[in-house]
Amino acid sequence: MAKSEAQKLKYKKHKRPHVLSVDIEHLGKKMEYKQPSDKIISEWDNYQKRYGWEDATDRIERMKIKEVVKQYWDTGQDVPGCVLLDVGCNDGYITRQIAEYCAKCIGVEPFVNLKDNKKPDNVKWYRGTFNDYTRISSTRFDVLLSLAVSIQLRDFGGLSEDQIAKAYWQLLSPGGIVIHETQKLANRPNNQEHTERMLEAFSKHFKIIEHGQARPSGGREYYHLLRYNNDN
């Protein structure tokens, strides 16, 4: 099968600023890591399969993910295609669809089984927690997908909202963008409070450049957040 134009783009590693690791331990007091129950893991495992490939396509369109990653296409100015990180990628439906428009994608997923036979050539899976991935990452990214996952990073990963936002900032290149999707907000006070805290934390490191409805049900919202070049 012929590769897309984005997949043909050469990943020029020497052109990209690097971060040796993200030291979460020094981003503030770390809370206790909690192992999700088998029931919760089973729900996550069945989530994307239940909603399907078309739902992933719809989410990509609603949150304008394709438009963001295409900003990093090679325009003849020695600019590599988008290097993207998908945090909590589940079965990788969104990662695999958006990979067509990226030079390189990494999907991080600790619990849902990721099948290599469904992986495009420019996608790599990391089977482990976000916390673990930050310790071994040697790449800064153009785009980071944080799709309905930040509350899990808090409740199970033991990270505060400030630690999550700061880790995202450190993983992104200057001018990088976080695409952040909230959990269900309608009649969910806990999710609403978490979203308010995430937005406050993001405001220290990012500027909101896009905001809209992520999905028609549950009052979910999305934000495009542009990384400040200097840490505030």
Image (spheres, grey):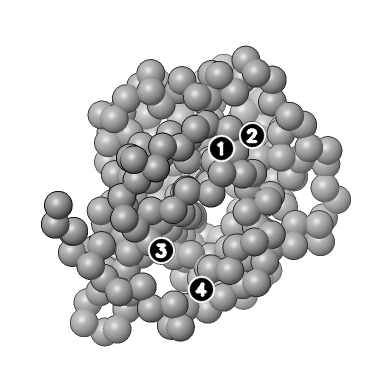
Residue under circle 4?
174
Q: Amino acid at mark 2?
A: Gln
Badge 1 marks a residue whose secondary structure is: loop
Residue ID for mark 3: 83
Q: Are marks 2 and 3 in contact (CB under 8 Å)?
A: no
In the image as oriented, which residue stretches furthest toward the left? 2
* Residue type, numbered disc 4: Pro
Name above or below for residue 122 compared with residue 125. Answer: below
Of the residues shown, which amino acid type is indicated by label 1?
Answer: Val
Q: Earlier in the sequence, mark 2 or mark 3?
A: 3
Kindly identify which numbered label has been placed on residue 117.
Answer: none
* Residue at 29% over, 44% down: 97
- Residues at marks 1 and 2 touching, judged by CB atoms closer than 8 Å: yes
The numbered mark, 4 or 2, whose residue comes first in the sequence reads 2
Task: Kindly check if marks 3 and 1 are in contact, taking CB atoms under 8 A apart as contact.
Answer: no
Q: Nearer the viewer, mark 4 or mark 1?
A: 1
- Name the spot of residue 195 as percent of width and height, x first: 61, 37
Q: Residue at x 59, y 57 (%)?
A: 168
**Which element carries disc 3, helix, strand or loop?**
strand
Residue 229: % across, % down: 56, 74
Q: Quadrant of residue 111?
A: top right
> Mark 2 packing: few (<14 Cα in 10 Å), some, or many (20+)?
some
Q: Identify whether 109 is placed above or below 175.
A: above
